[in-house]
């Protein structure tokens, strides 16, 4: 490969598949906020029989455990089951629709931004000619990338709409990532996956990807080790860590002082 700013372990990847929420954009926090609004309202309207199960949805621990990285309906069903509530289609659709309404409101208001370190890495990989794909179970992934101004850097975008159309199972099944690699015409054994969700890094490991990068943006000290346990070979706090440090600008050369020549 030609001279590059990209550091190992991505330097030798023939292709890279990126998750979107929490990796390219800070939309994971907005998803968590929207889920909390929807689940807390549902818990108030349908309180579990066990008083201990009536506690509000935790936007960190419950989000990571039950919904992060999963298709919307799967995440809704997972959390409802954890509280002993109805997981029939009507209940799942009700809470998922409420979450969707809150999330779309944030999306349309421009309340979601790309991570600068990720944008720098995307541009560096693109300059090196590395094929890039975005793969997300979110139906809003394409719009998020467009609003972030990076959609054009991806040779393939597999969002929740395409995933459902193809009948791909959700993470931790690797089908979504494998389909993205296929779109790039690269074998998983020569490609990398970049993910922030436990289900996502497990999907990368199960899919036989050569490299699985976990992104830990939390401050709790436990998510990084959990990412490694689920399949991440490398864990970073920010994707700028995978770029060589920028060289400091050279100091301007100061001209040597010289005595003026006297006019003759």
Image (cartoon, helix red, strand yellow):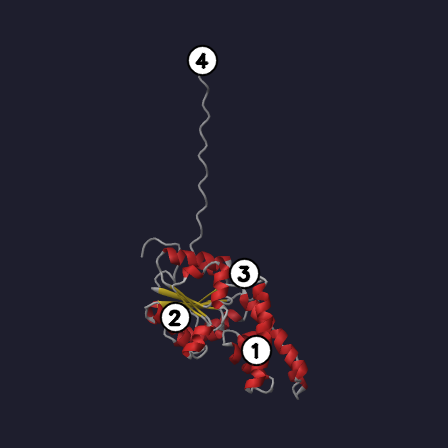
Q: Are marks 2 and 4 in contact (CB under 8 Å)?
A: no
- The Cα–Cα distance between marks 4 and 3, rounded to whole angstroms, is 64 Å
Quadrant of the image occupied by residue 66:
bottom right
Residue 48 position in % (x across, y down): 65, 86
Quadrant of the image occupied by residue 131:
bottom left
Residue behind mark 4: 263
Label 2's element? helix
Instruction: Give the residue displayed 50% in from the left and 69% down from the top.
Output: 140
Which of the numbered marks, if any, corresponds to residue 113?
3
Residue behind mark 1: 96
N-term mark: 3 or 1:
1
Outermost residue toward the top in this view: 264
Outermost residue toward the bottom in this view: 49
- The Cα–Cα distance between marks 3 and 1, rounded to whole angstroms, is 23 Å
- The Cα–Cα distance between marks 2 and 4, rounded to whole angstroms, is 76 Å
Label 3's element? loop
Label 1's element? helix
Residue 160 position in % (x across, y down): 47, 73
């Amino acid at each position: 490969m030609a001279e590059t700013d990209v550091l190992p372990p991505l330097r030798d990847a023939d292709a890279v598949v990126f998750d979107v929420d929490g990796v390219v954009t800070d939309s994971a926090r907005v998803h968590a906020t929207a889920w909390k609004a929807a689940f807390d309202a549902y818990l108030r309207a349908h309180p579990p029989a066990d008083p201990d199960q009536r506690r509000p949805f935790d936007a960190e621990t419950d989000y990571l455990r039950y919904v992060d990285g999963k298709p919307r309906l799967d995440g809704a069903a997972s959390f409802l089951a954890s509280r002993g509530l109805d997981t029939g289609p009507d209940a799942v659709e009700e809470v998922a629709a409420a979450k969707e309404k809150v999330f779309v409101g944030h999306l349309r208001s421009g309340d979601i931004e790309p991570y600068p370190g990720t944008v720098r890495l995307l541009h560096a990989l693109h300059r090196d000619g590395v094929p890039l794909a975005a793969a997300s179970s979110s139906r809003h992934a394409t719009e998020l990338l467009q609003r972030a101004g990076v959609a054009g850097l991806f040779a393939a975008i597999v969002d929740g709409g395409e995933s459902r159309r193809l009948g791909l199972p959700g993470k931790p099944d690797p089908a979504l990532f494998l389909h993205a690699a296929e779109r790039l015409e690269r074998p998983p054994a020569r490609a990398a996956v970049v993910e922030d969700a436990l289900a996502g890094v497990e999907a990368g490991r199960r899919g036989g990807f050569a490299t699985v990068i976990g992104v830990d943006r939390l401050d709790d000290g436990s998510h990084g080790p959990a990412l490694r346990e689920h399949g991440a070979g490398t864990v970073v706090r920010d994707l700028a860590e995978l770029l060589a440090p920028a060289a400091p600008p050279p100091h301007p050369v100061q001209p040597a002082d010289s005595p003026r020549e006297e006019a003759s």
